[in-house]
């Protein structure tokens, strides 16, 4: 029994370590504004779920706390370049719709 438990722990450790690095940012009030919030890009892993990322972004950025789940989206990317391109594209897109866009900054901890 101890050998089975030890083997399971070793396999779990390998599977947890095998998660690839990905990048993410959130966008709040994206449907109709009036102010669209776009967070900075963060590094995460494939093991992190979108609901977990939503909670992380809400904890880091007070501006996102009152935004309903239906109007807060988390986007995932394979490279930081893709993520940064997405942020800039979204900023331009919502600006063309005459919505105020706030590019949030990393918290100063």
Image (spheres, helix red, strand yellow):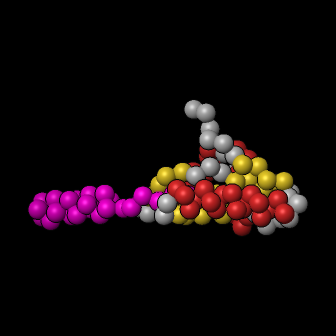
Relative to the observer, which residue lies in front, 18 or 89? 89
State which region is magenta: 1-24
x then y, percent, for residue 100: 84, 53
Say which residue appears at 84% left-offset and 63% top-offset. Answer: 96
Say which residue appears at 49% left-offset and 52% top-offset. Answer: 43
Q: Is residue 19 visible?
A: yes
Task: Assess whether residue 18 is covered by the magenta stretch.
Answer: yes
x then y, percent, for residue 93: 77, 64
x then y, percent, for residue 98: 88, 60
Relative to the observer, which residue lies in front, 82 or 5? 82
x then y, percent, for residue 28: 72, 58
Report the magenta stretch's main SS. helix
Q: Is residue 18 left or right of residue 72?
A: left
Say which residue appears at 62% left-offset and 49% top-offset. Answer: 40
**Residue 75, image quadrant:** bottom right
Q: Is residue 68 visible?
A: no
Image quarter in which the C terminus is found: top right
**Residue 38, image quadrant:** bottom right
- In the rendered view, would you say 32 is above or below 58? below
Image quarter in which the N terminus is found: bottom left
Relative to the observer, which residue lies in front, 65 or 46? 46
């Amino acid at each position: 029994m101890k050998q089975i438990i030890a083997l399971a722990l070793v396999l779990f450790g390998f599977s947890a370590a095998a998660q690839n690095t990905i990048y993410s940012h959130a966008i709040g009030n994206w449907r109709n504004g009036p102010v669209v919030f776009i967070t900075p890009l963060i590094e995460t892993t494939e093991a992190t779920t979108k609901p977990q990322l939503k909670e992380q972004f809400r904890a880091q950025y007070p501006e996102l706390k009152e935004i309903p789940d239906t109007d807060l989206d988390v986007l995932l990317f394979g490279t930081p370049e893709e993520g940064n391109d997405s942020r800039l594209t979204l900023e331009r897109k919502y600006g063309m719709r005459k919505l105020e866009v706030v590019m949030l900054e990393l918290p100063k901890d």
